[in-house]
Image: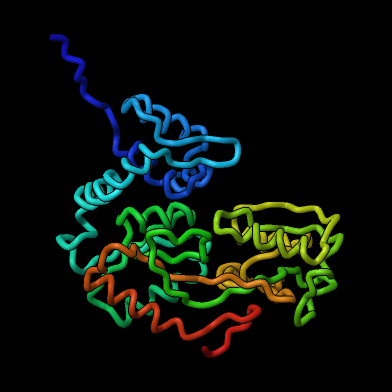
Amino acid sequence: MKDDARSLSVSLHQLRLFVTLARHRSFTRAGDEFGITQSAVSRSIRELEDEVALRLFDRTTRQVALTDTGRRLLARIAPLVEELEATLRPRVQEGGEPGVVNLASSCGLTASVLPAMLASCRARLADITIVMMDRPQNAVLQLVRSGEAELGVVIAPDNLDELAAEPLFADGLAAVVGASHRLSEAARIDWQQLRGTPLLLLDDDTGSLGAIEAALALHGVTGAVRQKLTQSAAVARMAEAGLGVGILPMHARAACDGPHARFIPLAPDVSRTIMLVRRKSRALRASAASVWSHIVASSSHTLISGQAVDA
């Protein structure tokens, strides 16, 4: 009798992509979470379907949806992938180093919010070492979901699937202008005052650009040249040199403020929330729970329209 059995060659990476794509229902968003292109996600999923000889997703020009077979497989695969990742990354599990906590943060927050936060933790939790993981925000969320980082500090994401979140403070948007700019002495700048002005925007992955563009459209700010930069400091320095008006989250002031540039709150206020996240499905170790509690308790200030006030 002919034996049709054959061994499967399926990688953990493919299975993680399968679970992530099922959650997002978007090749683009799944790719962003892994730091790869949409086409790379599509190719990997197609190879997985070919290998298991099953159609896992229905694809249209507008959406991606699990097939009935895909839903059944997801129910079996998702907990297995989580357990396998936990086994392969024991350092952050119960058997890991008791005094070491991995904390991931999106790059802009690492330069602005994290230094004071980490200094406070070191002063109050001297027996705990926090290992920083400085990544783009989508990578931070993936690190927390996978368990490689126990805690994450992010700007409120669109999708909190699998995560528990604690808001820390609200963060407004500010105009950044050079000392010689006509608006440099203003207490606040109305969005409409930016019409026709060259703008310097932060092209990051935290959603700041989307929030800024939405506010510009809402207030009819058209006809302005937009320069998109990847670093807050570059936005501030170019504004300082008189090359345009920068728009940055107010938290960037800590890392970018200088004697020849001013951060001026924009009105009406557009704010986003800085939050602490952890994985919902797994309890924190004692050391990570101590860091979580201290950060939440010490976030005693709220940024309202860019001004710090007691909460």
Q: Is residue 273 above or below residue 92?
A: below
Q: Position of residue 169 (x, y in %)?
A: 51, 77
In the image, what residue occupies the spot 34% across and 80% down? Answer: 294
Question: Which one is nearer the viewer's eye here, 202 or 119?
Answer: 202
In this rendering, is residue 306 above or below 36?
below
Residue at the location (47% across, 64% down)?
Answer: 154
The residue positioned 36% from the left and 65% from the top of the image is: 278
Q: Where does residue 282 sit, x and y in percent of width and height?
A: 27, 63
Note whether 187 is above or below 216 in the view shown.
below
Q: Is residue 175 visible?
A: yes
Res. 253 in view? no
- Residue 173 placed where, x, y %? 66, 70
Left or right side of 34 for 7: left
Q: Is residue 187 above or below residue 220?
A: below
Q: Residue at x 65, y 53 (%)?
A: 229
Q: Nearer the viewer, residue 198 or 273?
A: 273
* Location of residue 290 (image quadrant): bottom left
Residue 242, picture quadrant: bottom right
223 with respect to 284 (left or right): right
As drawn, the residue found furthest toward the left would be 1
